[in-house]
Image (spheres, helix red, strand yellow):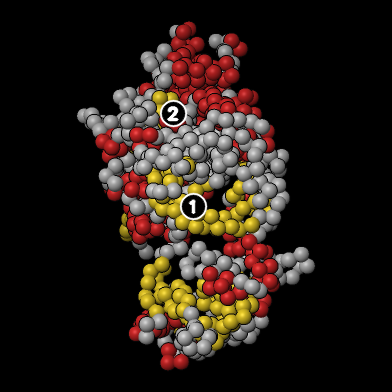
Amino acid sequence: MNTDDIERYDPLTIEPPIAARWRDERAYSLTPRPSADRGEGDETYYALTMFPYPSGDLHMGHAEIFSIHDALVRHLRMTGKRVLNPIGWDAFGLPAENAARNRGADPRGWTYANIDEQAATIARLGYSFDWDTVLRTCDPEYYRWTQWLFLELLDAGLAYRREALVNHCSSCGTVLANEQVIDGVCDRCGTVVERRPLTQWFFRITDYADELLDDLDTIDWADRVKNAQRAWIGRSEGAEVTFRTADAAGKAEDIVVYTTRPDTLYGATYFVFAPEHPLVAARMGDDPDYQAYREAVGRRSEIERLSSFDSDAGGGRAKRGFRLDFDIVNPVTDEAIPAYAADYVLMDYGTGAIMAVPAHDQRDFDFARQEDLEVRVVVQPQDGEPLDGATMAEAYAGDGTTVNSGVYDGLDWRETKERITADLEAKGLARATVNFRLRDWLISRQRSWGAPIPIVHCPSCGEVPVPAEDLPVELPDDLDFQVQGSPLALHPTWQHDVVCPACGSEDARRDTDTMDTFVDSSWYFLRYLAPQDDTRAWPVDAANVWLPVDQYTGGVEHATLHLLYSRFVVKAMRDRGHLAADEPFQALLNQGQVILGGAAMSKSKDNLVVPGEVYETYGADTLRGTLLFASAPEDDIDWADVSPAGMNKWLARLWRLSLEHLAREAAGTAEDHDADGVRKATARAVVGVSEDMAARKYNTAIAKLMTLTNAVLDATRDGSGGPAVREALTTLVTMLAPICPFVTEELWARFGQDGSVHDQPWPRADTDLLVEHEVVVVVQVDGKVRGRVRVPSGADQDTVVAAAHADESVAGHLDGRDVARVVLVPDRLVNLVLGG
């Protein structure tokens, strides 16, 4: 056979026609569609990957997550599962508005163009999504039901409106997210940002705080994600304690604080209010220095205010506090302690005021050192040198014994906590309580590329929900994104072109806020069950079969927002009778990042590698295989350490081995010279790869497939290869199919096999081939290795000893002496212990 005549592996010719056929034929659409009827013996499986945001073409992170997800899905189908594998786009959001402002682009056109580009790349890379389930959150057909969801929560008492502080840019005339405030200025125009009160909509997620916390124990998520949610929810047991202003009798005002450590009350040496606290505003409103301080604080975002202490332009500590002109009385010591306003206390967290215990809280400690305030130790660690407030370098927050606390001295801090709380409760100055760090979900956005909030404001009726039959409340087609402010609020007719649904008043107006895009993504997995249904948001009967999602794959960066909000929405909809599930996602896989040279990829760092650079050179299979071979799914991939060329070389070898074998068959020279060896190698590969695929260890599965490739190569070096080699190659192609779907599809057809390789059942190993009929047993004499003998598998002691005596090397060390004792490890080792 002239090997020079073998067709070269050319993925750029092989792959595109297959990709087009799969998409055109809807090869991976689930038929019949999801319903309450599982069918006899039907094993449903809902596999979901976090849907992308269409800000451009796919990046390498998308390629990684989709490659992991598709390997899972294709393998599941081959093992007999009926898999729902939908795709859609999280299509509302600020980037489209920025494109409209900065480039004069229409956000609709910009968004849909990016969706089309991403969809083409997804199809080109062979990801086996169900193209009959496509949704886009910016479609009115979708956000109609997002608005319905809002109305459901409103009717349940879980949506409400109240005043909250926002970041406002007077130049842009709009509200900014915390992330858009950089060093106190607008990231668009550089104008100093103000903190302003604004009436906004919230979802009452705090009503579900306990359940959100407790149900983490029922789902299969990584501990780091569960712990992130536990910290975000932040359940704590403590006490609400009442302090008073140090004023004359009858003029003192009460201030309630929440603390998890009432045992440290004797260590409270000063008191801190949020600068916006109404009591402070009432008492200090005429002080020009305080007003200047408040304005300075107002230029800081919430993120900046909660960060560690900064350095100012002069290199020293930035002043973050303001000494107020009144004091506060400590309820356990009756001392008057100084009162401050400080920006590290937020008005909308807790009560907007704290008791400051600098010896045992790091932020309080830093502030006390800055302001030269007393640091009083009230908990001493049981081991080590006693703490001294004057010389401490940092706060101590560990366990210990109560000191400097009157009658509580000598108690363990936990007992002090209980007793102080009880004693103050008896005086009406405290109440044991459970608190949560979690705050209600602020969903209002003063932006225009989002789902409008379906509320009409009527001067007579107040806030009136839009009737469900009148949804969707659609965005106008002629928004002007060059205006200074919200294009939706400044549209000349949109908000006024409405009558009150309750009384018919023409003086009513629409709510001009849109919903946080996390609302769109909090329920999209439900819409996938029937994305074209115009009568309901999702089919309840089908949802009760398919939910929770069996496997959700996506980035860990969504641990505390998207994932938490989705959990809340499912629980709320369950309580409304629209679902039976308690959780949205049963199992969660968080993939690692794709980095380059130890750094995250980005255009600004000029270290960006895009998928197109790889698949346009080596093909999609090489890109997919490289990503899955580089590491375990949960680990980061450093692109500097991987080799697409190496992966491509292996696929080319498999291609060549397959075509060489087909040429032998065509020539009538296909004969096996080591059929048993090849079949054993195949059986070992099936066992090992099957275990790895089930465990999602795709990198080690690929390594075992490479080992089988080498076994075939060794068996065919002399030009031989018959039925055993064919079996090995077709089995290898079948097991590689979930990872590299194109080359395997083509080779399956070249081998003359029926149908698609992706419709084949997963291979089963002939385990009889893996049973070793003979084994090699190590022989020791007095504990030293003296030889090795081949015996039948499972041989008894007499058989092994007889074989050892027959071995010349062993016999020489026995030297005719008697064996006093035999130690046998079956099928592995025998030790002959000689007599004296």
Indicate which disc residue 482 carries.
Answer: none
Identify the image quadrant of residue 471: top left
Q: Secondary structure at mark 2?
A: strand
Say which of marks 1 and 2 sits in front.
1
Q: Is residue 340 above or below residue 137?
A: below
- Graded by Cα atoms within 10 Å as few (under 14), some (14 to 19) or many (20 or more), the crowding at tag 2 reads some
| Total residue callouts | 2
- Earlier-in-chain disc, 1 versus 2: 2
Give how far across and how far down residue 289 sits, in percent: 69, 72
Which residue has dot 2 on it? 134
Residue 612 placement (x, y as % from top left) = 62, 28
Write the residue at 62% across / 44% down.
Answer: 485
Q: Which residue is mark 1?
A: 200
Locate the C terminus and report the quarter of the image it occupies: bottom left
The one of 565 and 597 positioned closer to us in this rendering: 565
Is 687 on the left or on the right of 489, as rendered?
A: left
Q: Is residue 777 visible?
A: no
